[in-house]
Amino acid sequence: MADADSAAGKNYRSEIPAPNEAYFLKGSNNLDWGLKNRLANIFNPDSGRTVMLAFDHGYFMGPTSGLERVDLDIVPLARYADTLMLTRGMLRSSIPPSYTGGIVLRASGGPSILKELSDEEIALGVEDAIRLNAAAMAVQVFIGGEHETKSVHNLTRLVDQANRYGIATLAVTAVGRDMARDAKYMRLATRICAELGATYVKTYYVEDDFDTVAAGCPVPIVIAGGKKIPERDALGLAARAVAEGAAGVDMGRNIFQAGHPSAMIQAVRKVVHGGIEPAEAYEFYLRQGADSGAN
């Protein structure tokens, strides 16, 4: 049995107050410990930002360009991503369990590109998300779309399920072909998602007044990369977005369809986490790409 005197505590350091620091991520201070811990697997605590690598496109597009062989083309990029956004099928079939970054699982789906895309349902149970150690579940929200109410209901159901087990909910604002991609729409869509409980929101960057979109959303916003654009322009997009209030980017085609995907994701990291200028990041991209081509 331990000696009573040696078992008694002595070094309480009563002159040092216990820390009571705010959580590093916008709108997240009052969340549970487990949810905050999962968010720290998505957002880098040092920069407060994230580089998400999205390759969930196959859930409605099939094997699109650059995603024909995820095992060969995407897995080598995973080590440069803070988090992966993908489907549970691709996670189980192609991603090594040794990957230690955050996992964001696509949780809605239904129609393919052959149908009306806004008619989605919840396509992932929270038990499977837990089984796969997901940090977040992502749901598409079609504000202004034909099935707006249904997609909003999908979000609220997912928030209820995810909150029960300390998993983050990512609301992805989908913009229809006939909708204007302007700040007014983005303010509406992102604020609705946040008001209904999304832990963070993915939306598109707009050239005019994006800072008002970020300021009006009380939770973190990450920027979708969208369609493939020239590498220099994609780096500029990332830089402008974070400078105007975004907490990072969720890029897919602008990384895996780049001329040099590995160099591109590293260049994006330098912009998002390192704060370097897009021109410098583009020079890095060219150097890295040339080196990889020579090997």
Image (tube, helix red, strand yellow):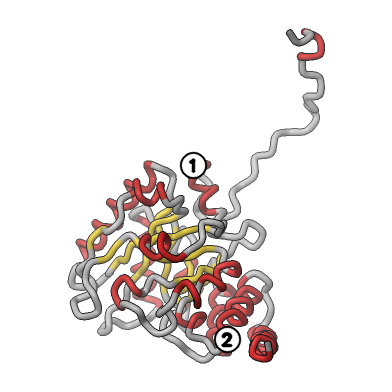
Q: Circle 1 sits in a helix, a strand or a loop, which is it?
A: loop
Q: Quick one: quadrant of the C terminus?
A: bottom right
Q: How far apart, in angstroms, are the residues tagged by discs 2 and 1?
A: 40 Å
Residue 150: percent from left, percent from top: 20, 61
Residue drawn where x is 30% and y is 51% of the image: 125
Residue 155: percent from left, percent from top: 30, 57
**What amino acid is labelled 1 in the image?**
Asp
Figure check: 265 above or below 153:
below
2 and 1 marks in contact (CB < 8 Å): no
Residue linked to disc 1: 32
Residue drawn where x is 48% and y is 75% of the image: 251
- Asked whether, in this view, residue 168 is left or right of residue 100, the answer is left
Q: Circle 2 sits in a helix, a strand or a loop, which is it?
A: loop
Residue 108: percent from left, percent from top: 29, 62
Residue 61's label in the rendered image is none
Figure check: 260 above or below 251:
below
Residue 159: percent from left, percent from top: 34, 51
Q: Quadrant of residue 154?
A: bottom left
Residue linked to disc 2: 260
| Front in this rendered view, residue 67 or 167 | 67
Residue drawn where x is 77% and y is 14% of the image: 8
Residue drawn where x is 53% and y is 41% of the image: 33
Mark 2 or 1, nearer chain start:
1
**What amino acid is labelled 2 in the image?**
His
